[in-house]
Image (cartoon, rainbow, N blue to C red):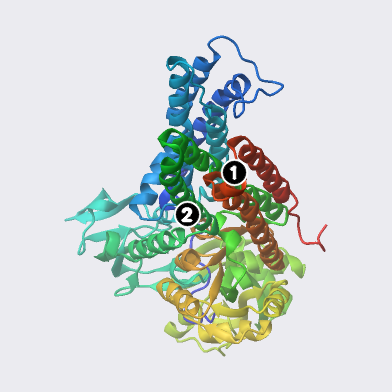
Amino acid sequence: MKMTEHSHHDMADTPMTENMADHDDMSQHHMHMTADPGMANMDMTDMKRRFWWSFGLMIPIIIITPFMGLSLPFTLTFPGSNWVTAILSVLLYFIGSKPFFDGAKSEIKAKKPAMMSLVSMGLLVTFWYSIYALLANQFVHGTHIMDFFWEFATLTVIMLLGHRIEMAATMKAGDATDKLRALMPNIAHVRHGDMMMDMPLHTLKPGMIVQVLAGEAFPADGVVITGHSQVDESLMTGESQLIDKSENSPVVGGTINGNGSLDLRLTQVGNNSFVGQLQGVLATSQDQKSRVETLADRVASYLFWLALIFALVALIVWTSLRGLSAAINIAVTVLVIACPHALGLAVPLVIQRTKSVAAAQGILIKNRKALTAANHLQFALMDKTGTLTTGKFSVNRIITYGLDETQAVAIMSALDSQSTHPLAQSITAYGRQIQAPLLQAENVTNIAGYGVSGMVNNTHYLLVSERFLSEKHILFTPLHDEGSISYLLKHDQVVAAISQGDTVRDTASEFVKHLVQLGITPVLVTGDNIKTAQNVSAQLGISAIHAQVSPQEKIALVIKYQQLGDVMMIGDGINDAPALAQANLSIAIGAGTQVAQAAADAVLIANQLPKIIDFLQLIKRAHTKQIQNLWWGAGYNIIAIPLAAGVLAAIGLMLNPMIGAIVMSLSTIIVTLNAMTLKASPNKK
């Protein structure tokens, strides 16, 4: 990152924090899930409340209601208990079934009936047929029809539990645009004649003149008309650079102003601004990714049609053979046996177990669809700064001209001791490392856009950029190092020069080698210049390089590579967020921005890139577990539904509801135990 045109670290230490904490608190309390059309924007708090109410209603139902007409050891019946069961079931029907009915409406509207439609069909059949059985048994003499209140209650609670688990795995997947919006200030200082007036951002229009004070975020895109400062544009580039801004310089909304005050004329506001367009791209990417159909959805869709078709055919055939009453009983049996108790838990239990194991490995899973994304990865697109590098500056080289190096570092450290900027902290840290003398600086002054000055040992010094030297016509020998370069002046003479740069992570090289061993091609994608990108890629052995890439270009690159194969994206910056949302699998660095973390499928909490390799291996095993559980959960349906419909009735083999329910219970136990057997990599303790 060559910065010879940029000033020394004179920018105020104003981090790009989020200024809408109240909004975040509310989103934590009132989270929505928009992963699938069928899930119908279910609210996590509402789902939790419905689950516990349903669970409380289920307990007495299974105690006082015979299982498939069979009294179990704990069954407690009494006169009128069947009416108590009916009342409790009516309450459960209205409390517990609504999320599934809403989801089924969305699936059917989208012409993609899947899990919600299958569950809704089971709930409707078991509840209303049970109500019919109750009334017929009570008011029609000599009639005894078996009800399914027991099955209705357990299906409702098990499915609510399964979807609670799934929602917990994805509840923060959609808040990246909110995080991005929070980077903008709440107000702008707008000029009205000779006065400045604070106005909300939604009232801004192109052509307005606004003032941005030191340390403030720019409210919209514009062009500087007066003033001089430096701007942190890492929002756009991901690079820790300070860019000089003066008259006619363009600025971007959301970036952070330095120590100077700037007046600018707005050019793009709202959705047309850089952040507005970034929000649009991010939202589109997340929406497209959220609509990718999961394997569980496809299995549920097949079972829905399988059960519906067999039930209708059985109704028609058995009506002609035994009459309508017998045919209805057989059709209902088919639909009851199709109730997806085990299928509803097959995937959520694996998700929950995988989250637990991954957390122990230092990875936070945020999107359940990450569990199916690692099997066919061909490319790993990686940001540079903060991902493959530490994102922290360190001293690369010091050149002195007639001054002792240790003394030069001591003077620079004294000038920078009052600053919290990363570049200044790098110098002071280096001073401590080499045990340079502790000197005191007096009358320290920031030179806006250039550097800093002060008195050390009664001598005036400046620590400034190359641009300052050029404009003041001071003779010097320029350094051509990569990174940020500053010059120490004494009596207008250069006495030392210091170059600082980002450093490659210790684990980056090992990580890239592991990717190649897995058959995944590493690709470096950075907003930095090509020379710096080539330097980092050479150290890591990466041949595919894309430099000076904007956020929009990053997402275009992801789409381009997706045409060749599945893509994993790894990044940490705001400018990485749209690409993270677009990729088949995305991982954000835990030390990065909240926008990137919100857009990603998973977050690397442990500060070690090879943990991602462990994660890829884990989710491959988790995907295998999902397949196994889906076979266990759906396999018995595939066999039981035709048998219940009477396909083999000619040879005396016909499945009754009790046997089907017993097999269903065993299947549910099997998928639970199978999910719990998922462990970390065999070579990990």
For the point 53% across and 81% down, the residue is 492
Q: Nearer the viewer, residue 471 or 30?
A: 30
484 is higher (above) or lower (below) than 123: below
Name the quadrant of the N terminus.
bottom right
Which residue is most to the left?
Answer: 193
Q: Nearer the viewer, residue 225 or 53?
A: 53
Q: Can residue 490 be seen here?
A: no
Q: Amino acid at mark 2?
A: Ser
Name the quadrant of the C terminus.
bottom right
359 horizontally vs 491: left or right: right
Q: Which residue is mark 1?
A: 654
Question: How packed is label 2: few (under 14 Cα within 10 Å), some, or many (20 or more)?
Answer: some
Q: Which residue is mark 2?
A: 301
For the point 45% across and 85% down, the residue is 470
The answer to which quarter of the image holds residue 457 is bottom right
Q: Position of residue 240 (x, y in %)?
A: 53, 69
